[in-house]
Amino acid sequence: MHKILVSRCLLGHPVRYDGGAHGPYSLLQQWQAEGRIIPLCPEVAGGLPTPRPPAEIPGGQGAQVLDGQLPVLTVDGDDVSAAFVAGARQALALVQKHGIRVALLKARSPSCGNHETYDGSFTGTRVAGEGVTAAALRRAGVQVFNESELDSIQEVLSQLDASYP
């Protein structure tokens, strides 16, 4: 049975920047009961507190943060890139330890967004891009999904479980 790396906020843990959470999602409850879920909040794992100031990537490209080309900045202008990269490294360590091939991460987050993020202007403007952890996981060959793609994850898990018992 394959494990899934899951953003802790999607499991109802109050780790969002504003101290909030999301969920519950019935499929996640099922996966949790099956022992599939490995929870992680990359931002908290990287050393950031809860609550914390909102942060965004100018241009919204997490891969460029990993490559040292862009920072992650808080709304106050503080550079929190090191914490975001440290959280991504923790995610990669969990992937390696548990043989994880699939991740469910929070949409649009500067850590976890897999299709789009915010542009760094703190105006709610979305851009095509991915968060720092999502980019690191994708580079490592992990399929990254968000909470609107639960059915796709179920499909991938079924295929993985069928081909690698």
Image: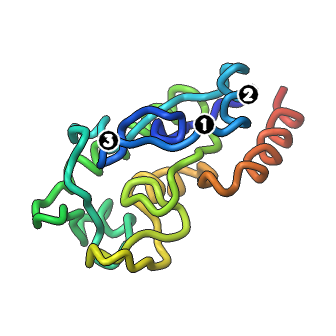
Q: Mark 3 points at which residue?
A: 19
Question: Which callout, 2 or 1, points at the residue further toward the start of the chain?
Answer: 1
| Number of numbered discs on residues | 3
Instruction: Specify the quadrant of the image occupied by residue 87.
Output: top left
Q: Which of marks 2 and 1 is in front?
A: 1
Task: List x then y, in percent, for residue 95.
Answer: 52, 36
Q: How crowded is mark 2: few (under 14 residues within 10 Å), some or many (20 or more)?
A: few
Q: How far apart are marks 3 and 1 (CA)?
A: 16 Å
At horizontal 48% and vertical 55% (from top left) the residue drawn is 134
Task: Pick whichever of labels 3 and 1 is earlier in the sequence.
Answer: 3
Q: Is residue 98 left or right of residue 68?
A: right
Crowding at label 1, few (<14), some or many (≥20) Cα neighbours within 10 Å?
Answer: few
- Residue pointed to by mark 1: 24
Q: What amino acid type should be assigned to the residue bearing mark 3?
A: Gly
- What amino acid type is highlighted by mark number 1? Pro
Position of the C terminus, as image quadrant, is top right
- Nearer the observer, disc 3 or disc 2? 3
Residues 63 and 110: in front is: 110
Give the residue type that dot 2 points to. Gln
Percent x, y for residue 67?
Answer: 30, 64
Mark 2–mark 1 Cα distance, whole angstroms, equals 11 Å
Tag on residue 30? Answer: 2
Q: Residue at horizontal 29%, vertical 64%? A: 65
Residue 72 percent location from the top left of the image: 24, 63
Q: Nearer the viewer, residue 77 or 137?
A: 77
Determine the secondary structure under disc 1. Answer: loop
Helix, strand or loop under label 3: loop
At mark 2, the secondary structure is helix
Quarter occupied by residue 54: bottom left
